[in-house]
């Protein structure tokens, strides 16, 4: 297999644009640089983590379609790699039509950033999910909650890290949940999703790598979220063979439907042998930070290899490992303490 990478800073270089330059983007940038790529790190604020390692950085509003198109046309990258959800996805569709390579592809990015899109796809694929209903007013929310039952989770259509999400235990609090969901979503919208509360034993991320005609799976990652935000993850997560097979089947179906090359973080809830699909990121996942110490190739190395069409050998587990996010108050960065647990 021949992959032409060229030399950075001269016209033959392979250019990659990172849309979002947080901690996950920084690790993607490092892997790109190891392989000799020229990285452009974009974000809305200066000195973002990936900007600290990339050869170039640019401060732009990635939700502004015109600005995003303009910047990409100037750089003319070989690969456009979204790291966050808050991007003008219409621009990505347009760029893909012009022949740019959007990772994994523009439609996957669009579908997964919107809970309605991804739930509808999961339904079409007949994947097990929590019961759910959509609502676009307080009255329709009341009807939706009656159909789904309490406790239930009310979420904005577009949000991440648990923003705008609340658990409704008592119908008396419905108005407060409605307000939180419509105020804290990524865009101003009156549409929310009501999901049945799943009393899972544990939740997992199944990192799934699509590369060429193949799909590879990492060992299962167990994790704990607090208020919808990542706290701790570990790998491997012990589970029954039957649940593991179900998890792999769900991840295979979902990622085949989304298509393109790269790493996907498939989020699943598990109770006994039952497995529910929650959502999927068409990019490395925060809970997958543990792979920096748990695997011979981290999720970031796998993502970059898959994008470039480089070979992906067997993914080796180096031993049970765990990682913890430390949120430092008043500071923008998140520190990751990595522990390799040795037996
Ligand atoms: N239906 C549910 N039943 C039980 N717990 C849930 C449910 N939905 C969400 N949660 C909990 O809230 C967390 C965040 O939910 P979800 O992944 O849907 O939101 P998010 O804002 O997109 O999060 P992120 O972008 O950080 O993955 C889940 O990882 C899980 O711990
Ligand atoms: Mg999630």
Image (cartoon, rainbow, N blue to C red):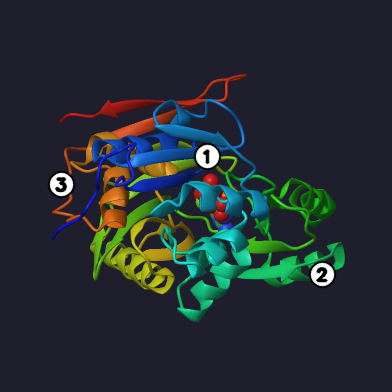
Classify the position of the C terminus by image quarter: top left
Seen from the viewer's position, the closer of residues 15 and 51 is 15
Q: Residue at x 53, y 53 (%)?
A: 73
Left or right position of 169 against 251: right
Residue annotated with mark 1: 42
Q: Is residue 7 above or below residue 91?
A: above
Residue annotated with mark 2: 140
Q: Is residue 60 above or below residue 152?
A: above
Q: Earlier in the sequence, mark 1 or mark 2?
A: 1
Q: Is residue 103 above or below residue 291?
A: below
Q: Earlier in the sequence, mark 1 or mark 3?
A: 1
Query: How many angstroms separate mark 1 from mark 3 (CA)?
Result: 32 Å
Seen from the viewer's position, the closer of residues 91 and 274 is 91
- The image's mark for residue 100 is none
Query: How many angstroms separate mark 1 from mark 2 (CA)?
Result: 40 Å
Question: How many circles with numbers are drawn on the protein?
Answer: 3
Seen from the viewer's position, the closer of residues 58 and 12 is 12
Residue lying furthest front = 11
Mark nearer the viewer, 1 or 2: 1
Query: How many angstroms separate mark 3 from mark 2 (CA)?
Result: 49 Å
- The image's mark for residue 316 is 3
In which image quadrant can residue 239 be found?
Answer: bottom left
Left or right position of 6 against 131: left
Q: Residue at x 30, y 38 (%)?
A: 8
Q: Residue at x 65, y 56 (%)?
A: 158
Q: Are marks 1 and 3 in contact (CB under 8 Å)?
A: no
Mark nearer the viewer, 3 or 2: 3
* Residues packed near mark 1 inside 10 Å, few (<14), some (14 to 19) or many (20 plus): many
| Residue 312 appears anywhere in the view | yes
């Amino acid at each position: 297999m021949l992959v032409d990478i060229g030399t950075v800073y001269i016209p033959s270089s392979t250019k990659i644009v990172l849309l979002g330059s947080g901690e996950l983007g920084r690790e993607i940038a490092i892997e790109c640089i190891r392989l000799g790529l020229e990285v452009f790190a974009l974000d809305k604020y200066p000195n973002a983590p990936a900007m600290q390692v990339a050869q170039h950085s640019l401060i732009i509003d990635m939700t502004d379609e015109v600005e995003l198109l303009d910047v990409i046309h100037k750089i003319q990258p070989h690969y456009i790699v979204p790291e966050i959800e808050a991007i003008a996805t219409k621009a990505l569709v347009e760029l893909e039509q012009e022949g740019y390579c959007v990772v994994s592809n523009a439609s996957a990015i669009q579908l997964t950033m919107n809970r309605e899109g991804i739930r509808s796809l999961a339904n079409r694929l007949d994947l097990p999910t929590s019961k759910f209903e959509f609502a676009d007013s307080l009255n329709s929310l009341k009807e939706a909650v009656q159909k789904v039952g309490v406790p239930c989770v009310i979420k904005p259509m577009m949000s991440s890290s648990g923003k705008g999400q609340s658990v409704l235990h008592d119908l008396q609090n419905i108005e407060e949940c409605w307000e939180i969901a419509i105020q804290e979503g990524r865009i101003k919208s009156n549409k929310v999703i009501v999901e049945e509360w799943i009393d899972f034993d544990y939740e997992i991320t199944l990192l799934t790598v699509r590369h060429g005609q193949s799909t590879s799976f990492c060992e299962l990652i167990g994790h704990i979220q607090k208020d919808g935000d990542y706290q701790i993850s570990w790998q491997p997560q012990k589970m029954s063979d039957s649940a593991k097979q179900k998890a792999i089947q769900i991840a295979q179906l979902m990622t085949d439907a989304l298509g393109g090359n790269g790493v996907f973080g498939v989020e699943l809830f598990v109770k006994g042998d039952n497995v529910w699909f929650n959502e999927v990121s068409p990019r490395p996942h925060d809970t997958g930070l543990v792979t920096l110490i748990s695997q011979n190739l981290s999720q970031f190395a796998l993502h970059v290899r898959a994008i470039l069409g480089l070979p992906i050998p067997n993914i080796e587990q180096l031993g049970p490992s765990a990682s913890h996010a430390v949120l430092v108050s008043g500071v923008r960065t998140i520190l990751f303490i990595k522990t390799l647990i040795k037996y």
